[in-house]
Image: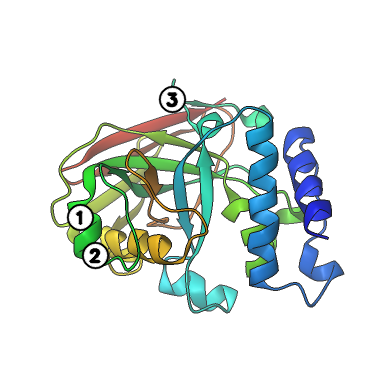
Amino acid sequence: MTAQFATELHLARQQLLEVETITARYPGFDIDQAYLVQAAGIELRLEEGERIIGGKLGFTSRAMQQAMGVKHPNYGWLTDAMLIHDGVVPLGRLIHPKVEPEIAFLLKDDLEPPVSVADVIRATDGVMPCLEVVDSRYMDFRFQAADNIADDSSAGMLMLGDPHPPGRLDLTGVVVSENGIVKFTAAGAAALDHPAAAVAWMANNCQRPLRAGDIVISGGLTAPIDLYPELFVTAEFDRIGTVQLRAA
């Protein structure tokens, strides 16, 4: 079953096909099984030449956890193929593209459990403003928590800004704009009360250790924005800079 679902989601991503949720077909499908499917899916990407560059957090806001009926975040993995280098999101490669602002951590040291917030800060070479483009292979962008995990926590693409010293990340504010018009405001505390707490949770729970050189994006700080052609999205963060992308 693990290989079957991993292959199905892998092909859905490549061929831009929506699939029915796994939980709808197998009601007993749980989070432990979902992480096995996720890991098998990442192996398929590695076999095709992609390289893991770090991790991502999902369900880090209390509101999202309540909506999904879970008490903890989840995690997924980032590969080099997900990086946006020119600030342009190619919508033709995505099914349900949405974007949300996040704080990204660039690690200078390995994180070995048990990991605390202070450990994450000490191990961080710099933090970067980030716009994550989430995507889902499930019909109508509707899924349960286990479905989301199996689908690599809805990983799509990401755009990173330049690294800066961490500072007080829980108090770091962000203003998100669509075509120059303010859409959302938030603070770093929206990600599990502190973005570094989200990274610590992943380090303590993930199946692959977080290593020096990894990038970890710590969870969405606002609701996602649907992407459509020629939409410009800008995220301006206190003290850690600005990042922008355009959908095309």
Tag 3: residue type? Gly
For residue 235, what is the image quadrant? top left
In the rendered image, is residue 94 in sight?
A: no
- Which label sits on residue 87? 3
On the question of residue 36 being in view, the answer is: yes
Question: Which amino acid type corresponds to the residue marked 2 in the rendered image?
Answer: Val
Tell me the number on the disc at residue 79. Answer: none
Image coords of residue 97 (percent x, y)? 60, 42
Report the front residue among 165 and 53.
Answer: 53
> Badge 2: how crowded within 10 Å, few (<14), some, or many (20+)?
some
Q: Position of residue 134 (x, y in %)?
A: 55, 46
**Residue occupying the far top of the picture:** 86
Q: Amino acid at mark 1?
A: Ile
- Element marked by disc 3: loop
**Which mark is first along the chain, 2 or 3?**
3
Could you tell me how far apart the alpha carbons at marks 1 and 2 are, in whole angstroms?
6 Å
Q: Residue at the location (42% across, 61% down)? A: 202
- 69 with respect to 8 (left or right): left
Q: Are marks 1 and 2 in contact (CB under 8 Å)?
A: yes
Task: Look at mark 1 in the image and give the residue it sits on.
Answer: 121
At mark 1, the secondary structure is helix
Q: Describe the element under mark 2 as helix, strand or loop.
A: helix
Q: Residue at x 20, y 41 (%)?
A: 240
Query: Between marks 1 and 3, how big is the CA–CA gap?
Result: 28 Å
**At 28% across and 59% down in the image, what residue appears?**
196
Mark linked to residue 117: 2
How far apart, in angstroms, are the residues tagged by discs 3 and 2? Answer: 31 Å
